[in-house]
Amino acid sequence: MDDPELGQVPNNLLALGIASETIDYAPLNKDKGGRPMTMTHRTTTTVTLAAALVCAGAALTTTAAQAQRQGPLVLAKASYFFVGGKLDPAVEGTAPVGQIYVEYMIPQRLRHRTPVVMVHGGSQSGTNFTGTPDGREGWAQYFVRRGYAVYVVDGVGRGRSAHWSDVHGAVSKANMERLTQRFVAPERYKLWPQAHLHTQWPGEGKPGDATFEQFYFSQMPSIVNYTKQQEINPPAIIALLEKIGPSILVTHSQSGAFAWPVVDRRPDLVRANIAVEPNGPPVREAEFKGAPDWFGESTRDKTYGLGEEPITYDPPVGASSKLEFVRQEKADKPDYVRCWLQKEPARKLPNLAKVPTLVIVSEASYHAPYDHCTVAYLNQAGVKTTFIRLDEVGVRGNGHMMMLEKNNMTIAAVMANWVERVGNGTRRQQVAGR
């Protein structure tokens, strides 16, 4: 039976052939006045949200522990499909190009109308979200248990989104040392000031350890040309959103650069933009050298500040009206990089500003010295952005692959609580566009 406040079965479920009697709708969350939570209940300041999460630190830990102890996942449906792309007769064998693989889980007890879409980072696949290398549940299961429909993507040319005939160019080679430095055991290399704080990897972080090898086995060849990746992934993600309806978009690392064009082109299809350590920093990539100098940087500016794909600025960017950038004279803290921002007066990002945005960074990751620069760039351009440093809300010791680490469910709870505070997880579709 359809819930009186949710109305009919959401379009994304109808598209997958799920009838109303299949779903057990839980009641919507309400505000103090008894109204369903909507976009107007937005939290866009770091201080308010961070304070609330610190107070709830014990509750987050309890929630995460409960998630790992719960019984079997009860689903209305679980399957997969492909979306986006085309059959290209110009490629040998008329190969499919530009498609993405999407795996989904619909909970039996659906508490939230808005689904969650998860997009992995570089050299990774959707398995980042559907489990951990030591056999625990992933972020996808956490959100399903919390009552969300979840869609997990393998990006274009990655994993089960096959890359036929090198149509998108060469792919990367295996690199165990870089994986160990950046993802698994940065504390052994100490290439950035925060690296020694890493404690949450579930294992010894070296060959011979079962968890390490499970993670290394999961690595995927990536299209070397990152500009090409930024070109081909947003259309496929938009095709997914057009199929399932407005969603909460969760991106990690490399795919953060895909999120900005997606939100820019279709803000009506993104209810919330969660950028987990998004590709950055803006304008110029950071390089890590270890003590005492710690940081270097690339010499090439990103054409659109946040990446290479066009996004809408006001006033517009054009061949005769390019973005101009300036670098901080002094970093915000000694162990941070110096940020690049727009030269004032800064152009605005009007479409990105329409969507609530969260940037989340862990304590020990190589993003810890620079993700504040992404937030500063967005805020300067009029995109009110919530910024959560996990260590500041009591979640300590994480690296870049936080979704796989020992306290992964605690971090999932931080994100879910933010989503529900801004009202996107429980809002009615009737308020779309407000």
Image (cartoon, rainbow, N blue to C red):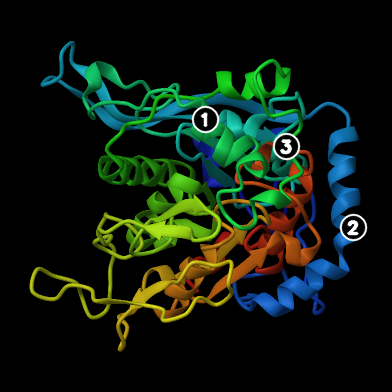
Q: Is residue 389 above or below residue 98?
A: below
Q: Residue 409 placed where, x, y %?
A: 77, 44
- How many numbered discs? 3
Q: Residues within 10 Å of mark 3 (few under 14, many from 20)?
A: many
Q: Earlier in the sequence, mark 3 or mark 2?
A: 2
Q: Is residue 418 left or right of residue 145?
A: left
- Which amino acid lies under the numbered mark 3 shown in the image of this protein? Trp
Q: Does residue 19 appear in this view?
A: no
Point 87% across, 51% down: residue = 61
User: In what element is the residue under mark 2?
Assistant: helix
Q: Earlier in the sequence, mark 3 or mark 1?
A: 1
Q: Nearer the viewer, residue 333 or 256?
A: 333
Q: Which mark is residue 340?
A: none
Instruction: Tell me whether circle 3 and circle 2 mark residues in contact (CB < 8 Å).
Output: no
- Looking at this rendering, what residue extends furthest in the front direction? 292
The N terminus lies in quadrant: top right
Q: Is residue 60 above or below residue 143?
A: below
Quarter of the rendering containing residue 144: top right
Q: Residue 37 placed where, x, y %?
A: 70, 69
Q: Nearer the viewer, residue 97 or 284?
A: 284
Quarter of the rendering containing residue 213: top right
Q: Nearer the viewer, residue 429 or 59?
A: 59
Q: Look at mark 1 in the image and give the residue it sits on.
A: 177
User: In what element is the residue under mark 1?
Assistant: helix
Quarter of the rendering containing residue 59: bottom right
